[in-house]
Every structure is written in structure tokens, then in C-alpha cells.
């Protein structure tokens, strides 16, 4: 019924599986999901491509984007800037897909402030040990950076009660389907659909007055 984009934030501890989940959602349901590509000042990991995982920026270029109001939100995360380019999200919202922002908690709060209907999902592995092992097993960060990210996770655990759903990423298949079902259901909630009901109501009014609909 809803014919405009629906904004969804997916947050979670580093290593909780956000990137993996989103890749899977996009490949299973390409017609239903659009992914916002963020800008960051961190270096690309092996295999990451400019414009696919991130737009990789220098600190100066990122600060210029802030000054030019090109970001919908931004935050610092473990020594780097991360932010959501505005125009891409605004264009995607004009379509009808679920627009997925994979961002951390400070950014999520900024987005909800601007777009109160945003659905906020927080993903976690089943335990601290699994988180540590997944982050280390990914093999993309040094032991020091892994430690900083796990320290950051302690703070994030304190802030996650603002989210609408907590999703446990134990079995990937189940987790992806759970997220897909939550998003489908949330799109149908009454407050998101009032505009459509208004259109039907107005058409019915015209019809009972004898007009064509
Ligand atoms: P994030 O984007 O949240 O930092 P990633 O998607 O990079 O996390 O996942 C971290 C690591 O955990 C990756 O090596 C990924 O393959 C692995 N992983 C993700 N989800 C699962 C899962 N359900 N079961 C086992 N390993 C997983
Ligand atoms: P990573 O370096 O692992 O790709 O991302 C580190 C953290 O930054 C993750 O928690 C991720 O969700 C977050 N992040 C990625 N892009 C953005 C963004 O555009 N804005 C904000 N606020 N956080 C982001």
C-alpha cells in the first residue's frame, strides 16, 4: 500500500554482522531494498570498493562535506569520521524501497530526529565471546583497533534501548528473514499508512457525490 521510501537504520556492535546481513538482504530482495553508501575517513579494507562499501575521503574532504551541509548526519567512531550523504538518501526516499542506513548510534539518533518515522534496528551476536571471535576472525583490524571497537561496544550497549528492535544474529539465515519480516510489518503500521487512507477516503467522498473514481 505504501508507495514512498521507508527509512531503516541498522546498527550494532562492530563485528555483529551488519554488513553481512545487508548484503544478504540486498541479494535476496533486490526490488525491496536500497542501501545508503556512507562517506568515511577510514582506509578501505581489502576487497572494499570506492562507492560500493563507502566513499573514502580525507579528513579535509570530509570536513568540507560537513561545512557544505552535504551530510544528513555524521559521527566520529574510533578515530574516524563516518557520515550519510544527503542527496542519495533523499533520492532513494522518493522511490518505494526500504532505504537501509548502516550507521552507529549517534547517527541513528540524528536520523530519527529528522525523520521520526525511521525504524531503528539493533543487531548483536549471541554473546561477547562470539563478538570477539567474529571481529578477530574477519581479520581486517589490528588487535589494538579490535580492542577499541570492543570498548566502544560497551558504550553502545548502554544506548541501545532507544532502538525499536533488538535482533540476535546467531544463524544468519534466520536473522535475515527476521529482519525482513519486521520491516515488512512495520511498513504496514497505521501511522505510516494514513496518507493512503486519506486518498481512499477522499475518493469515496467523490464517489458518493456521484463523481467517477
Ligand atoms: P559488521 O558489519 O557488523 O562489522 P560483518 O558483517 O563484517 O560485521 O561480520 C563480522 C564477521 O562475522 C564476518 O567475518 C562475517 O563473515 C561473520 N558473520 C556475520 N554473521 C555471522 C553469522 N550469523 N554466523 C557466523 N559468522 C557471521
Ligand atoms: P566500519 O569501519 O566497521 O565499516 O564501521 C564502523 C562503524 O561506523 C559501524 O558501527 C558503522 O555502522 C558506522 N557507520 C558506517 N557508516 C556510517 C555513517 O554514515 N554514519 C554513522 N553515524 N555511522 C556510520
Image: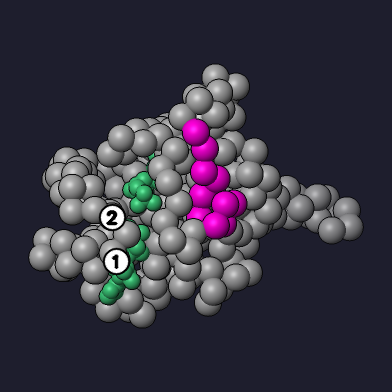
x 87%, y 54%: residue: 210
Other residues around mark 2 within 10 Å, as few (<14) / some (14–19) / many (≥20): some
Which corner quadrant of the figure contains ligand 1? Answer: bottom left
Does the stretch in magenta take in 52?
yes
Residue holding disc 2: 141
Which corner quadrant holds the C terminus? Answer: bottom right
The alpha-carbon separation of the residues under discs 2 and 1 comes to 8 Å
* Badge number at residue 138: 1
| Residue 3 percent location from the top left of the image | 66, 56
Whether the residues at callouts 2 and 1 have beta carbons within 8 Å, the answer is yes
Quadrant in the picture for the N terminus: bottom right
Q: Position of residue 42 (x, y in %)?
A: 41, 43
Q: Can you tell which mark lies on residue 57? A: none
Residue 27's x, y, as percent? 54, 74
Magenta region: 49-58
Mark 1 Cβ inside 8 Å of ligand 1: yes
Amino acid at each position: 500500500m505504501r508507495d514512498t521510501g521507508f527509512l531503516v537504520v541498522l546498527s550494532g556492535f562492530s563485528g555483529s554482522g551488519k554488513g553481512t546481513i545487508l548484503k544478504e538482504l540486498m541479494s535476496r530482495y533486490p526490488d525491496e531494498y536500497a542501501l545508503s553508501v556512507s562517506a568515511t575517513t577510514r582506509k578501505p579494507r581489502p576487497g572494499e570498493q570506492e562507492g560500493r562499501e563507502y566513499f573514502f575521503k580525507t579528513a579535509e574532504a570530509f570536513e568540507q562535506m560537513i561545512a557544505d551541509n552535504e551530510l544528513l548526519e555524521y559521527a566520529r567512531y574510533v578515530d574516524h569520521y563516518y557520515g550519510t550523504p544527503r542527496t542519495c538518501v533523499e533520492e532513494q526516499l522518493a522511490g518505494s524501497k526500504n532505504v537501509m542506513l548502516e550507521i552507529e548510534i549517534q547517527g541513528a539518533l540524528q536520523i530519527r530526529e529528522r525523520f521520526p518515522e525511521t525504524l531503528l534496528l539493533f543487531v548483536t551476536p549471541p554473546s561477547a565471546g562470539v563478538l570477539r571471535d567474529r571481529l578477530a576472525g574477519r581479520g581486517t583490524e589490528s588487535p589494538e583497533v579490535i580492542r577499541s571497537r570492543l570498548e566502544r561496544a560497551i558504550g553502545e550497549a548502554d544506548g541501545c534501548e532507544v532502538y525499536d528492535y533488538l535482533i540476535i544474529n546467531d544463524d544468519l539465515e534466520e536473522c535475515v528473514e527476521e529482519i525482513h519480516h519486521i520491516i515488512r510489518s512495520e511498513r504496514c503500521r497505521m501511522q505510516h499508512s494514513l496518507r493512503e487512507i486519506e486518498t481512499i477516503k477522499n475518493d469515496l467522498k467523490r464517489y458518493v457525490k456521484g463523481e467517477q473514481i
